[in-house]
Amino acid sequence: MARQTFTEIEIRLFDEPGKFVVRGRSTKAVVAALVRGAPAHGSWLRQVARWVEGLVEDGWQYRGYTGDRLLFRNSKPLARNDAEAYVQRRFGRDALARVSVRDRAEERDFTKPPKLPKADDELTRELRRLIAPEAHKEELYLGHPTEELSELLLDMSFLSQEALEDPEISGLIEELRDEHEHDAQYRDLHTRYLTLMERIGPSDPAAEEAYWDLFSYMSRKLSKMVPALRSFLERRGFTDLCEHEATAFLTAALSQALSIIEDRDDE
């Protein structure tokens, strides 16, 4: 074990945790959430969005959202006075009323294996964006008016159920299911995620990262189904679906397929 020191910046959004939600691990998601939340929670959130963009430009890493505060880290330790001077110079003299600076030391195990690469392709991004759509419809944009979104997702869900009953697709799912049953890499990722959940809880950045590692790995496996699903659409005559309708269909089908593939774990 080696001890490593970091400088952290904490931006207080609210005096106590509230209903404001920040989803995703990217700073783009944070900035989008702040701008989107400004009308309901205060126009000053737009100023914080600019602060976030400035921190990223200067090399600070986003570490998470606690429900009332945003946390950023710099791998290069700074003296407290230097860090506070940086905040005032970058964001104004009044910034320290909302921004706090601290040093944090951690025990790091540098012998652990490297992280698996995340899937950052179009499929994974769309899957992440459409997780539990009914829970956060206001964050979705599929190129359709909001009032049409529920109907669109419902229609594509029914169509995806038909697709999974197609012999070609059901056969592919069974192949993936057999492969998944003997997938040691998946087991390792899943065990790591569950262990972190039990030790530090779901809101910790490390647990979130472990979840997205697991999610991205499964997304890459499920991507094998995409050509077969598109072929199903063509056979059924759905050749005029717009990009957003196709995305909704693929997401619904892959989500249901994942449930079938993982169902054997519980048998």
Image: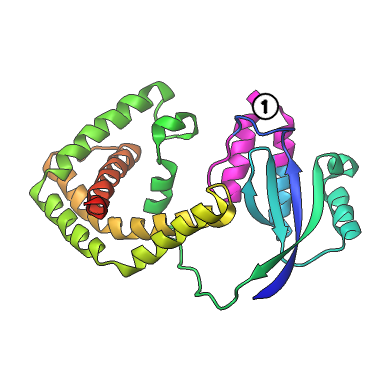
Residue bearing mark 1: 41
Q: Residue furthest left?
A: 167
205 in relation to 93, above or below: below
Instruction: Identify which residue is drawn at 8% across, 49% down.
Output: 167
The quarter holding residue 238 reads top left
Region rendered in magenta: 21-48
Q: Nearer the viewer, residue 238 or 215?
A: 215
- The image quadrant where one finds the N terminus is bottom right
Q: Is residue 19 left or right of residue 234?
A: right
Instruction: Identify which residue is drawn at 11% across, 45% down.
Output: 166
Count all numbered tags in the image, as a single digit.
1
The quarter holding residue 116 reads bottom left
Q: Residue furthest bottom?
A: 111
Whole-percent x, y for residue 180 in the image? 25, 61
Q: Is residue 171 left or right of residue 63?
A: left
Neighbour tally class for label 1: few under 14, some 14-19, many 20 plus, Cα within 10 Å: some
